[in-house]
Amino acid sequence: MDSNDKHQVTKNRHLLQAMGHAFDGIVAMLRDERNMRFHVLAAVLAVMVGWWLKISTEDWLWILLVIFLVLAAEFLNTVTEAITDLLVGHHYDINVKKAKDVAAGGVLLAALFAVAVGAIIFVPRLLVLIR
């Protein structure tokens, strides 16, 4: 490694340094990952609808749980894709396909759970407003 290289290769020395790297990761996800932007948009809409409908504290806990579950799943999916791509480059490998498919399946399951929770919480309240 060049002595002029400023990239960190050692452990973080303090909490603020670690938090800075974590913030960089969040920014990279929002900048580089289309699906993450979609999930954030869906989360913002869910929060706006929840606020508009004045949902209960218990309902807010469920909504926040599924929002962060989906976001965490998307982060893990992206890590899986990045690491497997790094390992195999531009070559096809059945194990890499399986790893990527399983990680994507985790995101899909989390998203379906979020839709189910949203439907349970929002649909009855919206039907009352329509009638």
Image (spheres, helix red, strand yellow):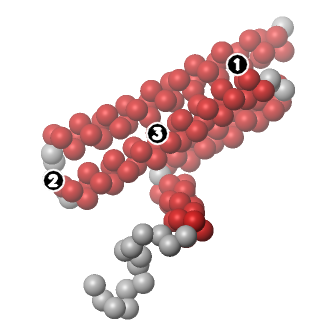
Confirm or deny contact between disc 3 and disc 1 (CB under 8 A): no
The circle drawn on residue 75 is none
Label 1: how many Cα within 10 Å (few below 14, some 14–19, many 20+): some
Q: CB atoms at circles 3 and 2 under 8 Å apart?
A: no
From what the image shows, is residue 44 above or below residue 117? below
Q: Which residue sits at x=50%, y=73%?
A: 13
Tell me the mark number nearer the camera, choosing from 3 and 2: 3
* Residue at 15% over, 45% down: 93
Q: Is residue 13 above or below residue 118?
A: below
Residue that mark 2 sits on: 91
Q: Quadrant of residue 17?
A: bottom right
Cα distance in 3D space between marks 3 and 2: 25 Å
Q: Position of residue 57 (x, y in %)?
A: 78, 27
Which label lies toward us, 1 or 2? 1
Mark found first going from the N terminus, 1 or 2: 2
Quarter where residue 14 is shown = bottom right
From the image, tell me which residue sits under label 1.
Answer: 121
Q: Amino acid at mark 1?
A: Ile
Instruction: Identify the residue shown where x is 47% and y is 52%.
Output: 33
Quadrant (top left/top right/bottom left/bottom right) for the C terminus: top right
